[in-house]
Image (cartoon, helix red, strand yellow):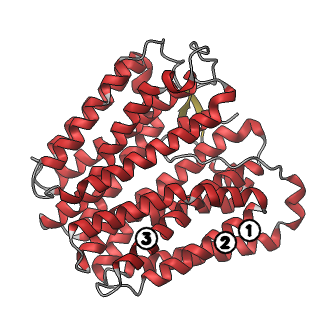
Amino acid sequence: MSRAIPTPPTVRSPMAGVALPWRVAPPLVSTALIYLSAGVLATLLPLRFYAQGLSASAIGMLATIEAVGFLVGCLYAHRIIAPVGLERAYAAFAGMKAVAILALHFAVGVPFLALLRFLIGLNAAGLAVIVESWLNALVTNEQRGRMLTIYVLVVGLFYGGGQLMGESLDIRGPEFLFLAGIATILALVPMAGIDVRAPALPHRVELRIVKALKTSPVSVLACLLNGLILTAFTTTGPLFGEKIGFDQRQIVVLMACVSLGGLFLQWPIGYLSDKIDRLYALIGLGAGTLAVTAMLVTVDHRTPFVLLAVLFAAFGGLAESLYAVGVAHANDRAEPIDYVALSATLLFMWALGGAIGPAVGSLVMELTRPSAFFAYAVVLTLAFTLFAIWRLTRRKAERALETREEFLTYPQTSPEIYAWLP
């Protein structure tokens, strides 16, 4: 079944004569504040809920509900944006997200927490849709590649930086929630200072799941797998660290290793995927992720912390690259006119995995032992790798249909990012 998602047209910037760093600074500063806030919450919220007595499965379900909110926001944010415009919609999304974050301090009971997590996910998607629409309008086609690299770095660095800020914050107190809420409110300031007309309102694009499966089933499964294991680990990772006896500082550092490993390993892996058949690259990523998760199954509190940090960074880098290389491989096999809809469909599959993974992964941990999450990841990654190898044996005759597109790293933020595709 296809669903409508927004994507703005590529338009020539009304400020084409202004240097790139200055005209894109306001939305980038806003993005930095939003992802700083998200990073602070990512590791500390699961630890807070666990300290309050919630079970691992309940914490995973709350993360699933936030992911569902994000998915709903990606699909329907344009219905809020269209009547009021981008500026007012941005203020509404930021205000509602900040209120939901701050209200977590007063929330009692899983139903209220679930409502707040849903609102956080919904409004996070709306903010990403608007910022990416604006950035797309502020740059020319020639500048879009540089802009994408800067945007990916801002998202990744400030998200990881937000995680590291949680090292000394009290998970039982309100301070980290206040910090995240204030950062979200401050994100309004730079966007209010943009002295250029808003870009065109988002248009609707059809999700084409069946066509994506026909174009590249391996890419669809790679993006789904990324959500099922890596996005899920955002929630289960802190619980894993808590259950095997690490303190808050160690857990924060380990989770930052996952995020920063995912950020920095994508570029060398992407460069390599430009030089070889990307299906081989996906098989290699599957095998590498399988090897790392198999090693992580055996870890406990006696494992040297430095070794665990390296394994977490490798897990983040390899699993994150499954998404980026999967999108590139799908676009290699698609017509240029289909790039935006295809990439948005792959984002949908990632978000679907991100909605399922936390609930399943945390339940596995609760019913067995902490490292069982990695056994869950081993099973999924093994299945993906075997399927990719099988596809390699079946598609020899299809290789003439492929073209080669240069690798680009896209963050999993909103469907609007794919409107930047040339």
Tell me where residue 344 sits by quadrant. Answer: top right
Residue 229 visible, this orientation: yes
- Residue kind at label 1, given as amino acid type: Tyr
- Residue kind at label 3, given as amino acid type: Phe
Neighbour tally class for label 2: few under 14, some 14-19, many 20 plus, Cα within 10 Å: some
Which numbered mark, 3 or 1, is in the foreground of this view?
A: 3
Q: Mark 2 sits on what residue?
A: 284
Asked if the residue at tag 1 contacts the one at tag 3, i.e. Cβ–Cβ closer than 8 Å, the answer is no
- Residue kind at label 2, given as amino acid type: Gly
Which residue sits at x=24%, y=43%? 180
- Element assignment for label 1: helix
Neighbour tally class for label 1: few under 14, some 14-19, many 20 plus, Cα within 10 Å: some
Which mark sits nearer the N-terminus, 2 or 3?
A: 2
Say above or below: 116 vs 84: below
Asked if the residue at tag 2 contacts the one at tag 1, i.e. Cβ–Cβ closer than 8 Å, the answer is yes
Tell me where residue 25 sits by quadrant. Answer: top left
**Quadrant of the rendering where the C terminus is positioned:** top right
Please tell me which residue lies in front, 264 or 80.
Answer: 264
Which residue sits at x=51%, y=39%? 151
Q: Mark 1 sits on what residue?
A: 280
The numbered disc on residue 312 is 3
Which mark sits nearer the N-terminus, 3 or 1?
A: 1
Place of residue 368 in the rendered image (x, y in percent of width and height, measured from the top left): 31, 84
Tell me how far mark 2 sits from mark 3, CA to CA.
18 Å
- Left or right: residue 257 compared with residue 102: right
